[in-house]
Amino acid sequence: MSHPDYRMNLWPLGTPRGVSAVAGPHDIGASPGDKKSKNKSTRGKKKSIFETYMSKEDVSEGLKRGTLIQGVLRINPKKFHEAFIPSPDGDRDIFIDGVVARNRALNGDLVVVKLLPEEQWKVVKPESNDKETEAAYESDIPEELCGHHLPQQSLKSYNDSPDVIVEAQFDGSDSEDGHGITQNVLVDGVKKLSVCVSEKGREDGDAPVTKDETTCISQDTRGLPEKSLQRSAKVVYILEKKHSRAATGFLKLLADKNSELFRKYALFSPSDHRVPRIYVPLKDCPQDFVARPKDYANTLFICRIVDWKEDCNFALGQLAKSLGQAGEIEPETEGILTEYGVDFSDFSSEVLECLPQGLPWTIPPEEFSKRRDLRKDCIFTIDPSTARDLDDALSCKPLADGNFEVGVHIADVSYFVPEGSDLDKVAAERATSVYLVQKVVPMLPRLLCEELCSLNPMSDKLTFSVIWTLTPEGKILDEWFGRTVIRSCTKLSYEHAQSMIESPNEKIPAKELPPISPEHSSEEVHQAILNLHGIAKQLRQQRFVDGALRLDQLKLAFTLDHETGLPQGCHIYEYRDSNKLVEEFMLLANMAVAHKIHRAFPEQALLRRHPPPQTRMLNDLVEFCDQMGLPVDFSSAGALNKSLTQTFGDDKYSLARKEVLTNMCSRPMQMALYFCSGLLRDPAQFRHYALNVPLYTHFTSPIRRFADVLVHRLLAAALGYRERLDMAPDTLQKQADHCNDRRMASKRVQELSTSLFFAVLVKESGPLESEAMVMGVLNQAFDVLVLRYGVQKRIYCNALALRSHHFQKVGKKPELTLFWEPEDMEQEPAQQVRTPLCPSPPSPDDPSPAVPLIPSSVSPGLPQHCSLPGRVSGPTGPPSSPRPRPVGPAFWHHLPFFGGNHSGERRALPVLLMHGCWPSGVFLRT
């Protein structure tokens, strides 16, 4: 098979409901900005497509009376005509059907909606088994449910070593929200890369949607039970346009060359189908675009929406920039950053003037008198080997009575960021550093991030410390907060710390360790690590006894070529005891500081809360587990954690089933949020669901999170180092909201960067083979989780070589039967049944155990073999006919593997489905 051409495929957008699909003047009523269209057609000419927004006064009154509802709009990237906002009561999301009902709002906007009459509500067909349509289809789960201190991306120069091991794609906050590493952005498979294949089975709106596949709107709902209706609404106002209004995509000419529009505008087709197509003036386009449009078919552009009129299907925009060739890392990365509003520009001269000018900078002598001097203590950092922004350090001094003095020492960033300065303002606006696979977009200038603030070894540094007296069991006997000066004796990597933990009685050779200052020995550092590890194990055990939750999910790490920057390989990052050690003490410090600032400023503390799971989605998951006979207790975070820990065995398939269920459990989880304590009257709302604690905040990463800088200022005021923070509670809440928004955007960008590199790796280095496990079956599709890479994939029946398929419920269990098309037309079609969480083992009477069988059922919990598309290997001929009795392992069926881009578009990659082995083998190959 020849190597495919991986050019971006410009699929046309699906047609908004009630709107013509023709990309020409006949469907728009008026040209952009010109209501006097000369076209004779009257189709849509006199009638607005979108409703006029309500007035601010009416909106305010409606929200007060409860006749209007506000919420953040989520558009389903798989079915972009579907959108949702959360229900205020935590019940099933409110459904918004179609582009017209969205009324020009974009994904992430804060909107106000008005409920439709009940007869227009969405009818949820119970037999469709399609409950997941409510989900955001992006990972809305908080990264804090993952491990704290998952190594963030802080890369050395590519020239530092032959291969750069990228240890994380996430910013490594804390595991406060119970999530291990979230990799849900790969829910839709390999992103960005595509080839021209048949449109059969496409996920986006171009493919016809059958009544069997989705729910429908009924005109007569009187006889239906209340449970089968989902409240539906329309957008009447946009409170805040949180979407950047920027998109990456492609240019093409309008369809009608004779129209007036053709002479003035080109059509910009966003890669993200949730963004409308956009008219852009030809004067913004390359000079030879009209004459040579094909030359730009694979060129990625950035466009910004400037207007979207009520009588026009498409928005009006300005072409901002040509990025380069689609599918290449740097153009795609710049597009991702721009779409999500990440400021990656150089810091201005005004900002840089706020930094210390006389370099090398040294600590002023008078500062030592204001701080506790810890420079002689054995203090060290533990970070990814590539990290350069070192926020935190640890110390552990044994005491004569058998207890320990344990310190968490955090870079005193607030010392270098004067309140109200230009530096402060830009840090507040950026709110967070953004960690991509290949680089970091810093919140602060690199002089601060990597030198002045970073706790580099054998250098005097200003810090803010929390120091406890702890028993070996982790019981707190005493606690101290204060400004300090430290001198880290060494920079350990997680691997260094892990080797010390694993070799408690062996001296680690000096050549295997980083340089250690002469005042301290490697044995002293080794013993401190062992003592911290022992205490951390006790703290961790007690946290889970007290009801904490952790949802570990797979996270990809990449090896990059030092010359090209391209990915050479990937692996799942292993979360080990050294990671857990750091995590426990960061959590302890954050909780201690939360209580300290809340006691001092009960109306002005910047805290972090984690709401309980979404009620309706949780109920659906409870129902699913009940159907499958899984004894999972969802009554509390601790009960869920206990169920996940104890329900499954430790064999290969049990662990895979646990991975699937863990993934499912993450879906109802909500984001953790910064908030000002003075604006929430009910202390119960302060609670952190996953950690199961009453108060929590972020203190430990001020180099990369502005919220932590604010918390440092609050703590300094609480300790009398400075005056009270000059910020009213509502102003602090606005900053908290902004931090929440930027944190979510940063998380999306990090995930999409991972997706991009994974796609490039698959394209360049494939095939990547892995077992997958079926997660669930729908009426016309089934989902699998590729275990080795954490990739979720939906496989559509109309993309398979099937003669037919049939969905039914046997009892409560959904069952999808596939009738495969035989190669020999004289044969009967082979039948395969897919049902949830009940794997069928090979037949006991199989005469040859080495020859696999077609399983009678494939389900969540049922492993599949899976390889992602790349260079050709293995059988490439036409499919052979699988038989219902023992068959060999090389029976292939073509299966479009839906990729897509970083914004949610779905495009098909050619893959093959191999079936006829146990467990049923899904091989995704070019």
Image (cartoon, rainbow, N blue to C red):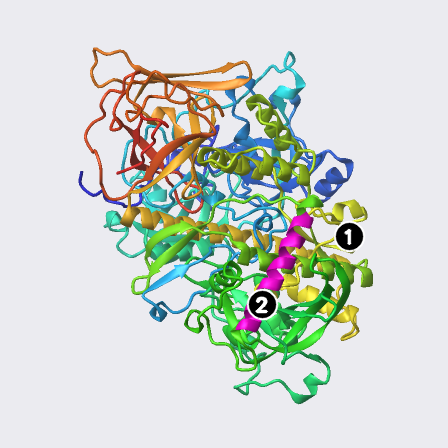
Secondary element at tag 1: helix
Query: Mark 2: few, some, or many residues within 10 Å (few <14, many ≥20)?
Result: some
Counting the numbered discs, the total is 2
In x, y percent, where is residue 688? Answer: 70, 48
Quadrant for the N terminus in the image = top left
Q: What residue would you read off at disc 1?
A: 679
Magenta region, residue range: 523-543
Q: What percent of the width, then of the height, locates residue 3? A: 20, 43
Closer to us: 115 or 328: 328
Name the main secondary structure of what is drawn in magenta.
helix
Assess disc 1: are there few (<14), some (14-19) or many (≥20) residues with their C-alpha within 10 Å of its C-alpha: few
In the drawing, does residue 473 fall left or right of residue 240? right
Residue in the foreground of this view, choosing between 781 and 507: 507
Q: Is residue 274 left or right of residue 864?
A: right
Between the C-alphas of marks 2 and 1, the distance is 46 Å
Note whether residue 263 is visible: no
Q: Tell whether 765 sits left or right of 602.
A: left
